[in-house]
Image (cartoon, rainbow, N blue to C red):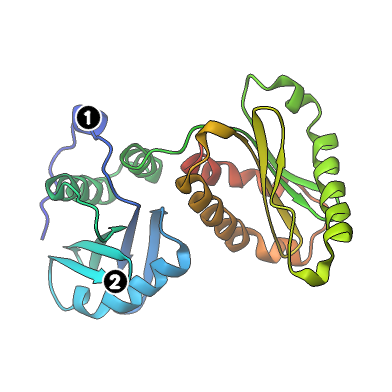
Amino acid sequence: MIEIEDISQESLELQKEIQVLGIGLISMNQNRYNIVFNKGISRSLMKDLIHLYRTEILSKKEGKIIDLLGIFTVYIHFYSVGNERISLFYINEKDKLVNYGDLCSLSRLLVKLYCSNVSHSKIWQICNRAIPSVKGLSALFVISTTGHTLFTKIRNDKTNLSENYIQIGGFLSAILMFSNEVIGKSSGENLQAINFENQKFLITVEEGIIFAYLVEQPTISGTIERYMELLKEEFFELYYDCLKDFNGDLNQFHTFEPVVEKYFSI
């Protein structure tokens, strides 16, 4: 069983970046599990990992697991706290090296935080420091194909965008509808980008919702594209019921901001 020692402010501030693709903090017992935090691991993959390793985790008081799973290496550290197992899941590309000592240190810190009176927001801060959000985005628009701008996050220096976000949302919705007519819905193709001089909108559409990311072109990377998919998945997990019976209330989407900040620095 892990011993819960005093957590100094210094230990919180010194936590550094670790070279992994994703992290998940899970509490579980024989009857249930709870995903306290996950970043860089899709919710569906996180649930698959829990299902795959849960029996082994619950069979021991604490331990470590390293396993190859498809294109990933999976690292799991788990600890016994009462009747619960507090588990840290990390994934990385299978051919990439990781500082295993850093993983162990981070796991122990996060478990101590979880078991102390520190708020879960502190856990988010530590995890986001360990896997930083991506820079290079000027704005994010989440828009329904019917023209409702559900959520926006705009960089502070982009005042023109802030002042005209409703019109921009309408423009993006209209141009997507136009492109569908030109390309043809039956082709299965969708508009994926709108280019400007030194920026572009990267666009993904699913279930009648448009996700448009205004990106500074030199910064476009595989990480941005991966985070776009993860963000989309978390949006639908949070708001699927709201969208199914949408009543026009946009205030309910304000809670999406912490999820955006987890992945993108805007």
State the residue at coordinates (46%, 69%). 44
Label 2: how many residues lie within 10 Å, few (<14), some (14-19) or many (20+)? few
Lateral position of residue 220 relative to residue 214, left or right = left
User: Split into 4 quadrants, where in the image is the C terminus?
Assistant: top right
Circle 1 crowding by C-alpha within 10 Å: few under 14, some 14–19, many from 20: few
Label 2: element kind: strand
Q: Quadrant of residue 56?
A: bottom left
In-front residue for pair 2/214? 214
**Relative side of 168 to 45, left or right:** right
Give the percent coordinates (x, y) of residue 67. Answer: 21, 69
Instruction: Answer above or below: position of 20 versus 139.
Output: below
Q: What percent of the width, then of the height, locates residue 39?
A: 41, 52
In front here: 95 or 206? 95
Q: Mark 1 to mark 2: distance in Å?
A: 31 Å
Image height check: is 135 above or below 121? above
Viewer-side residue, 116 vs 92 = 92
Q: Where does label 1 land, which residue?
A: 14
Residue name at image x 31 percent, y 40 percent: 130
* Callouts 1 and 2 close, C-beta under 8 Å: no
Q: Residue at x 85, y 35 (%)?
A: 167
Amino acid type, residue under disc 2 in the picture: Leu
Describe the element under mark 1 as helix, strand or loop: loop
Q: Single out the mark in the foreground, 1 or 2.
A: 2
Q: Is residue 20 visible?
A: yes
Q: Which disc is residue 209 wearing? A: none
Q: Which residue is mark 2?
A: 69
